[in-house]
Image (cartoon, helix red, strand yellow):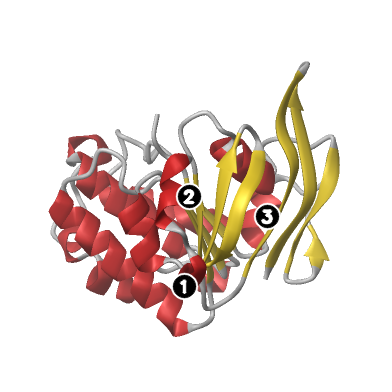
Amino acid sequence: MLAVDNLHLYYGASHCLRGVSFKALKGEITCLLGRNGVGKTSLLRTIMGQRTPRSGRISWEDKPLDGLSPSDRARRGIGFVPQGREIFPLLTVEENLKTGFAALPRHQRSIPSEIYDLFPVLRSMLKRRGGDLSGGQQQQLAIARALVMRPRLLILDEPTEGIQPSIIKDIERVIRWLAGRGDMAILLVEQYYEFARDLANGYAVMDRGEIVLSGRREDMDEAKVRRYLTV
């Protein structure tokens, strides 16, 4: 599992993460909810090694991640789909997928056939540039690129942002299928209550850099959670 324990992060004098603690288990989807600006993306970037916390501990599969670079964390089996997708617009779809090879030993550097089963649209667009794809297609490509790495922990930062409803349904189906395999922990950051509620096994809600609510899906109090999602 992923375990975050009493994490504190500062940007200069700004205290961005305040004692954040939670867990994400293999075979489950853990949803992290909250408005814009409450620290969700900062938390994910800290987990990925792109930010250095002042104090606290992050461990994955019972091993600490302290001091590891983002590339080393990727080699430990952590895949990250950032907010805004961040695909390479001038590379083809196939070339974008192959960038996931960087975290793999040479003998594993192939695109799993299941990628095209999960995202059939990518098969017909392999030679198209990433920048020519629609926003929803780019989101599918970003998730597929992370899956090329064969992650055991998949982190998704607001995958529904700016995406048309039909593709949101496709992404929901893929996330549910991945969790159902039982060999992957999924950490899903979302603002939309219904999407998180329908997928989550466990949840945590952030506000002003802190976890203010957490628990299992069956215990979610919609009114309380929505209070921290509305502007």
| Residue type marked 1 | Glu
Q: Residue 224 carries which label?
A: 2
> Dividing the image into 4 quarters, which one contains the N terminus?
bottom right
Which one is in front in this view, the residue at disc 1 or the one at disc 3?
1
Mark-to-mark CA distance, 3 and 2:
35 Å
Residue 35 percent coordinates (x, y): 46, 35
- Of 120 and 109, the residue lying toward us: 120
Quadrant in the rendering for residue 207:
top right
Is 69 placed above or below 174 here? above
Q: Position of residue 159 (x, y in %)?
A: 36, 48
Q: Residue 218 carries which label?
A: 1
The image shows residue 99 at horizontal and vertical percentages of 45, 50
In the structure shown, which secondary structural element does the residue marked by tag 2 occupy? helix
The amino acid at mark 3 is Arg
* Number of marks drawn: 3
Q: Quadrant of the C terminus?
A: top left
- Residue holding disc 3: 73
